[in-house]
Amino acid sequence: MSSTDESPEGQSFSSRELRDALGQFCTGITVITAVEDDKPVGFACQSFSALSLEPPLILFCPMKTSGSWKGIEKAGRFAVNILSEEQEDVSSTFGRRGDDKFAHIDWSPSPMGSPVINGVMAWLDCEIDQVLDGGDHWIVLGRVDNIGPTKRDIRPLLFYRGAYLSIEEDVVDPAPEMQELENFITSADSYTWL
């Protein structure tokens, strides 16, 4: 039995069971990028979220052992690249350790100099606002300084139960009776965050 199959003392579930349960939550995939000492760095990240509109804040959670995160932290600024469903290869490239992840990736610098990957659905140019402890990850709050154009004619790259997932509908509109969706920070309508 591997360590991920064993329940830590005082805990009724194993790391594998926790990973399986969390895998039921479908997420998008981003690539967090920066330039450290004139060299682009980055990693694939599914633990990304909108946080606040006023002030404009986002958050993501890198592993404490991530070498790419160390470079991004040193840079003090980063870009969030929101991947489209056509970018599984980009996700796979940035999901691996080592190698020059940018060797076969087309990108251009954001206004703050961080790499913006060609073909993304949207990008955000951010500065590190706070770094908080989150167990085996860091919780990074970023203040959004610039945003790129949003491409609404392409679909997102999604991750679900340990695999990529595609949606079939081009447009997802909430049903009129679902007024509570107006409270979501990414709602298309006016809203008040709870």
Image (cartoon, helix red, strand yellow):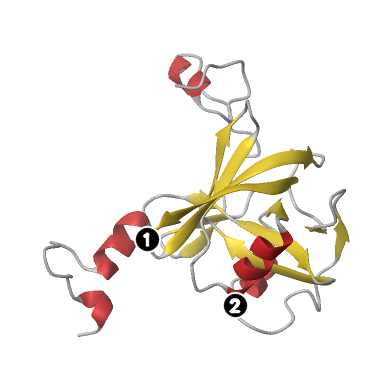
Residue located 69% across and 64% down the image: 74
Q: Circle 1 — which element?
A: loop
| Quarter of the figure with residue 22 | bottom left
Q: Circle 2 — which element?
A: loop
User: Left or right: 194 with respect to 34?
Assistant: left
The image shows residue 181, relative to residue 130, as above or below, that is above
The image shows residue 130, relative to residue 18, as above or below, that is above
| Quarter of the figure with residue 73 | bottom right
| Quarter of the figure with residue 40 | bottom right
Three-letter code for the amino acid on which mark 1 is drawn: Gly
Q: Earlier in the sequence, mark 1 or mark 2?
A: 2
* Viewport quadrant of the C terminus: top left
Numbered badge on residue 96:
2
Residue located 57% across and 53% down the image: 166
Alpha-carbon span between mark 1 and mark 2? 22 Å
- In percent of width and height, residue 19 lies at 33, 63
Three-letter code for the amino acid on which mark 2 is drawn: Arg
Q: Report which residue position mark 1 lands on.
A: 135
Q: Are marks 1 and 2 in contact (CB under 8 Å)?
A: no
Determine if residue 80 is in view: yes
User: Left or right: 183 with respect to 153?
Assistant: left
Mark 2: give few (<14), some (14-19) or many (20+) Cα within 10 Å: few
Question: Foreground residue, 36 or 157?
Answer: 36
- In percent of width and height, residue 6 lies at 18, 75
Numbered badge on residue 191:
none
Determine if residue 155 is in view: no
User: Left or right: 25 with respect to 96?
Assistant: left
Residue located 56% across and 46% down the image: 59
* Viewport quadrant of the N terminus: bottom left
- In percent of width and height, residue 119 lies at 80, 55
Residue located 50% across and 50% down the image: 27
